[in-house]
Image (spheres, rainbow, N blue to C red):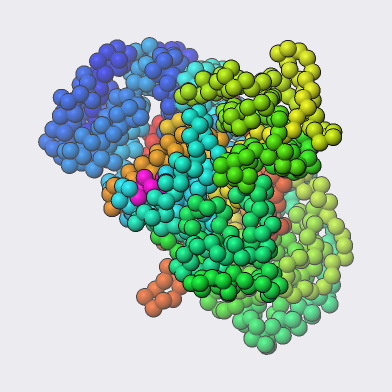
């Protein structure tokens, strides 16, 4: 920037066409001067302002970002700003956990009559950002970390230990036999064409009653098999029965809500489970399946501690933003962009993922830090209010990135802000796509 | 490679004083895809527009950026100019370097630098702008009016007189609404029925108005220009075609003591009845809750007596469908039911006024019937309890209105006027009588309104007390009204024969359900929401659905009629062409990549997302997908944000365009 020897921040303002853009116009017609550091991007509505755009602006070197629209009740499109508000509520929590500098991300409601407010907001943000200095969001010094490549061995920031540890309750051997008998009966009667279950080494797709011995039920049955329901080759086999634990079952609720499966098209075999020794099992409150058509076994009643559900998030929030950013920089620096997290996720069923779309290139494909942050933010946001916490992404990640923590962050936000837990109550309304007039907006000025 | 032309405006001195326009044009000339960049003193003036047109032709430009004022100012102007030169108007963008640059900065270097940045984003965007054409939606030039009160009748007649067919749906057995029951109207005291009934007859006989009385809207599908309405015709037990309206059935019906809905319980009617003599259509209905034939298969006298054989006890509800292009909602109001209805759990209503407990405490619409020449007492004012002519009447204003603690916070607007009217009508009938009015404020804004109130006080001698009534009790056939006169600062006790409560106006029953069917909004009190309180007072947020009359807010007859004509004129504007032209800057969904999660459907404020099944030629289902209804989408783009695969995109602000802008900032 010319005209000044000091640092001149770059402020990017995403504004709606009907209120804040006109408010900025009014500032102009009223000749209300403000610093020229702001670049205003006009979109039809705050509802249109996608979180990816904010990430892109930060990647592009914005030192602060402003999102601004119509006051509640004034939206030109009735409710676009309410939908936006909800999205920002979740997005902010994610950015906070990632260690992004929240002093640089601003939300305001500025009406077409508030030229003066526009002037003040821009002046204040510019001053504040000038004092903060350039935003080096992607230049954090990554914590030295050589643990990459340990499958399922993500380090919990809560405990600092690598890998899961809880004592394992050996599943009842009776349950395995019961499961095989059930599968034999279902396949024999022709009720289902394939039983998707756990095998000795990965999933098995049993299509003949004679093959039911391939099914196992032991402490290794960690995978969430519902992810296979979306696979074309599995669908081609005919009506499936799928073996689920109480936790996996939640994904079926979400998938049904999102019109991906019809409940009557899937036979659900619910396994009572006392835990598979995973981190999530410590806080499990779904030992018994609740919606399954068939039930096998009975849980020993080793209830988890739901209070500890989000302990990992709270632990990382106890660190400073700089430490958080350094932590995630180290995590994401290991990302290979292999998309195993996407492939294994039962909720990632798009035919064309946004990461594979290159017009426009919302997410850089090469595995450098910016692109990695963009991918993991987009993935987490896509799972906001949808992730059932099966932790398959974390288990599948060959780089051992603590993806679970990202998902937990948004699950925690959805539960604390909207009282919603994905897949728990089929009648509950998911937080994204709905809004409430009572939604909190203390972060919006 | 694009061939973009950039035109930098000086806006006289407005831009050129703070922004070095030469430097901006020069910098633009070097931006990728820019073919030519020029500046001119007044781009919006004829020579400026001519320059743009000339360059589009000579340089074969395929996109244009005009760097000047706000797009809210001149985007249409420049897009027209581009279209005149053969360029698709949506391939023109504006860069706002006046309102958002030259007018708010004074450091010329930095303003110039910012202006170049602004133009750079516009240039980056315009490369990706799609050539769009306006969306055309077929228009069924036929309207439906819901509610046959004075507003609905006015709207229906206006639209029908303009040459279009109208379907008028009324849930009561006759059109006429509340106005048909009023005695006389302020401020002229002309008789309500004298002015309304000719309009009712006109509507009933109009060759282009199809009446559905005793009918309710069951459901509506479709969108502007293409609504399909299902109307439930409630069981009447009378064959409308055969009946001649002779009235013999009403005479012979032995069950004559049923409270009349039309008289608000002040009079009685038989089990088979026309609500009032001038009803349109002049056809009776049978009240199935009391008719002896229907209740216990007795009686049946009317059936025997009816010469044309119009009585049909086997009658059943019928569903009719009507295709219409526009819908006018005119469902009117009801009165706040004092003491029996609490707007919220916190409020207590007005139990202390004894409405429902003392027969001689009535509401204003009941009073209208008592003094109406066609009312149950034929215009003689007799009080309900003993039929005596009241020698004193107390009128209490704001019962429910403007009372957050017990009722509703809003002003019902008409009560001050009709209360003044009531005192006059009373005094004209009972010359020696005393009219007392307890009021909070007199709100008499309107042509001849304040004069009217003054006349009631000064000429007809109504006694006005500024204050509230705290309690009404009954003693020896008299009502004791205890209140305060806050201007005099004294408590007031009036011994009276009749009390009339001016209770608040509320939206008619069922309006919230109707609003849901039509996808229009209600405010917290249930009044229907207009699209904009000032500039779009009769439009709603659903294209093709309009509101008028007291369903939108409390209002009097002149205002209702004016609003009805306004709604009718909006309907007629939309009917002026056989196709509706809509802005093409709306959402679209790539059905190939859509994963059919329908997040967009839940989010869309306009219910513009449809579920479609894509099928192969042999009928096999290939996939399901979401599709945007072009008649409903308003282009907010909220669907784009929630679409995980970005299969949804919004024209005018596509993902490519928006990312290009963000990237141009770097």
- Name the residue located 79 percent from the left edge and 56 percent from the top edge: A284
Residue B325 image offset from top left, x and y in percent:
38, 53
Magenta-colored span = B155-160
- Name the residue located 15 percent from the left edge and 24 percent from the top edge: B47
The answer to whether one can see residue A140 in this image is no
For residue B494, side relative to residue B65 (left or right): right
* Pick the front one: B605 or A2: B605
Relative vertical location of residue B17 with respect to residue B331 in this rendering, above or below: above
Residue A385 image offset from top left, x and y in percent:
64, 50
- Name the residue located 84 percent from the left edge and 77 percent from the top edge: A174
* Count of residue discs: 0
Majority SS type along the magenta span:
helix
Q: Is residue B159 magenta?
A: yes
Query: Which residue occupies the extreme left position in the image?
Result: B58
Q: Is residue B14 magenta?
A: no
* Pick the front one: B659 or B617: B617
For residue B403, side relative to residue B277 (left or right): right
Residue A371 image offset from top left, x and y in percent:
50, 43
Residue A326 image offset from top left, x and y in percent:
63, 36
- Name the residue located 64 percent from the left edge and 59 percent from the top edge: B270
| Quadrant for the C terminus of chain A in the image | top right
The answer to whether one can see residue A4 in this image is yes
| Quadrant for the N terminus of chain A in the image | top left
* Pick the front one: B19 or B504: B504
Relative vertical location of residue A170 with respect to residue B472 in this rendering, above or below: below
């Amino acid at each position: 920037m010319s005209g000044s020897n000091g640092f001149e921040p770059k402020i990017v303002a995403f504004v709606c066409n009907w209120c804040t853009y006109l408010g900025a116009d009014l500032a102009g017609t009223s000749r209300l001067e403000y610093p020229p550091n702001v670049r205003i991007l006009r979109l039809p509505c705050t509802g249109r302002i996608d979180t990816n755009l904010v990430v892109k602006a930060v990647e592009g070197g914005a030192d602060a970002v402003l999102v601004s629209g119509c006051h509640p009740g004034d939206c030109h499109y009735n409710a676009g700003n309410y939908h936006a508000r909800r999205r920002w509520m979740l997005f902010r929590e994610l950015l906070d956990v990632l260690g992004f500098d929240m002093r640089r991300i601003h939300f305001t409601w500025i009406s077409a009559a508030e030229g003066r407010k526009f002037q003040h907001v821009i002046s204040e943000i510019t001053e504040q950002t000038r004092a903060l200095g350039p935003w080096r969001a992607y230049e954090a010094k990554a914590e030295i970390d050589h643990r990459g490549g340990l499958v399922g061995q993500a380090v919990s920031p809560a405990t600092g230990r690598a890998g899961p540890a809880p004592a394992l309750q050996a599943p009842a051997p009776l349950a395995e036999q019961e499961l095989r008998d059930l599968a034999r009966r279902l396949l024999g009667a022709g009720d289902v064409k394939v039983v998707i279950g756990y095998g000795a080494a990965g999933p098995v797709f049993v299509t003949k009653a004679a093959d039911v011995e391939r099914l196992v039920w032991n402490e290794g049955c960690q995978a969430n098999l519902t992810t296979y329901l979306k696979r074309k080759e599995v669908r081609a086999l005919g009506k499936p029965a799928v073996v689920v634990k109480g936790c996996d079952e939640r994904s079926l609720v979400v998938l049904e809500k999102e019109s991906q499966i019809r409940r009557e098209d899937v036979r659900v075999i619910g396994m009572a489970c006392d835990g598979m020794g995973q981190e999530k099992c410590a806080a499990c409150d779904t030992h018994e399946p609740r919606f399954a058509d068939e039930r096998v076994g009975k849980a020993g009643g080793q209830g988890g501690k739901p209070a500890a559900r989000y302990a990992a998030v709270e632990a990382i929030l106890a660190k400073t933003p700089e430490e958080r950013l350094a932590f995630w920089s180290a995590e994401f620096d290991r990302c290979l962009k292999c998309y195993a997290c996407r492939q294994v996720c039962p909720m990632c069923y798009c035919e064309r993922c946004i990461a594979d779309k290159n017009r426009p290139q919302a997410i850089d494909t090469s595995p450098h830090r910016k692109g990695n942050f963009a991918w993991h933010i987009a993935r987490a946001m896509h799972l906001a209010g949808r992730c059932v916490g099966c932790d398959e992404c974390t288990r599948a990640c060959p780089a051992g990135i603590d993806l679970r923590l990202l998902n937990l962050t948004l699950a925690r936000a959805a539960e604390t802000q909207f009282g919603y837990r994905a897949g728990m109550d089929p009648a509950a309304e998911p937080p994204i796509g709905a809004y409430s007039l009572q939604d909190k907006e203390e972060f919006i000025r | 490679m694009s061939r973009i032309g950039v035109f930098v405006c000086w806006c006289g001195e407005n831009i050129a004083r703070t922004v070095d326009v030469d430097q901006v044009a020069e910098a633009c000339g070097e931006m990728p895809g820019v073919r030519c960049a020029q500046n001119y003193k007044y781009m919006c003036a004829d020579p400026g527009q001519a320059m743009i047109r000339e360059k589009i032709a000579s340089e074969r430009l395929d996109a244009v950026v005009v760097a000047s004022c706000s797009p809210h100012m001149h985007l249409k102007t420049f897009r027209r100019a581009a279209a005149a030169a053969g360029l698709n108007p949506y391939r023109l963008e504006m860069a706002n370097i006046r309102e958002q640059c030259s007018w708010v900065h004074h450091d010329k270097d930095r303003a110039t630098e910012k202006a170049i940045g602004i133009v750079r984003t516009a240039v980056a965007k315009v490369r990706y702008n799609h050539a769009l054409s306006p969306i055309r939606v077929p228009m069924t030039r036929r309207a439906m009016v819901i509610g046959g009160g004075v507003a609905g009748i006015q709207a229906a007649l206006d639209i029908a007189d303009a040459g279009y067919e109208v379907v008028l749906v009324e849930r009561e057995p006759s059109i006429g609404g509340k106005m048909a029951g009023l005695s006389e109207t302020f401020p002229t005291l002309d008789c309500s029925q004298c002015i309304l009934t000719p309009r009712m007859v006109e509507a009933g006989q109009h060759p282009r108005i199809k009446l559905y009385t005793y009918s309710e809207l069951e459901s509506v599908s479709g969108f502007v220009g293409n609504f399909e309405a299902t109307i439930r015709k409630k069981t009447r037990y009378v064959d409308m075609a055969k009946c001649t309206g002779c009235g013999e059935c009403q005479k012979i019906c032995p069950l004559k003591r049923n409270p009349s809905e039309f008289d608000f319980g002040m009079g009685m009617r038989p089990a088979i009845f026309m609500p009032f003599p001038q009803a349109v259509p002049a056809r009776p209905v049978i009240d199935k809750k009391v008719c002896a034939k229907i209740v216990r298969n007795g009686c049946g006298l009317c059936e025997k007596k009816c010469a044309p054989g119009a009585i049909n006890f086997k009658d059943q509800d019928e569903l009719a469908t009507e295709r219409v292009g526009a819908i006018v909602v005119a469902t009117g109001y009801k009165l706040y039911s004092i003491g029996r209805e609490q707007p919220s759990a916190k409020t207590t209503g007005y139990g202390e006024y004894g409405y429902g407990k003392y027969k001689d405490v009535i509401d204003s619409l009941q009073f209208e019937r008592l003094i109406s020449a066609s009312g149950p007492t034929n215009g003689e004012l007799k009080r309900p309890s003993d039929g005596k002519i009241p020698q004193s009447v107390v009128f209490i204003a704001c019962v429910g209105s403007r009372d957050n603690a017990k009722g509703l916070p809003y002003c019902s607007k008409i009560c001050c006027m009709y209360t003044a009217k009531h005192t006059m009508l009373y005094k004209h009938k009972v010359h020696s009588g005393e009219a007392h009015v307890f009021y909070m404020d007199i709100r008499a804004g309107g042509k001849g309104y304040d004069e009217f109130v003054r006349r009631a006080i000064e000429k007809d001698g109504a006694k006005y007390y500024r204050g509230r009534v705290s309690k009404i009790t009954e003693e020896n056939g008299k009502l004791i009204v205890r209140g305060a006169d806050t201007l005099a600062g004294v408590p007031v006790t009036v011994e009276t024969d009749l009390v009339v409560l001016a209770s608040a106006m509320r939206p008619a029953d069922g309006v919230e359900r109707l609003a849901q069917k039509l996808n229009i909004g209600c405010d917290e009190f249930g009044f229907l929401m207009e699209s904009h309180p000032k500039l779009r007072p009769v439009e709603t947020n659903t294209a093709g659905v309009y509101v008028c009359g007291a369903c939108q807010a409390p209002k009097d007859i002149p205002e209702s009629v004016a609003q009805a004509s306004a709604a009718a004129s909006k309907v007629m504007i939309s009917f002026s062409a056989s196709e509706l032209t809509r802005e093409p800057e709306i959402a679209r969904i790539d059905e190939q990549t859509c994963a059919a999660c329908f997040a967009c459907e839940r989010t869309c404020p306009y219910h513009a997302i449809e579920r479609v099944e894509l099928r192969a030629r042999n009928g096999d289902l290939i996939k399901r997908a979401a599709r945007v209804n072009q008649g409903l989408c308003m282009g907010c783009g909220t669907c784009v944000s929630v679409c995980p695969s970005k299969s949804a995109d919004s024209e005018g602000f596509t993902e490519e365009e928006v990312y290009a802008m963000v990237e141009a900032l770097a």
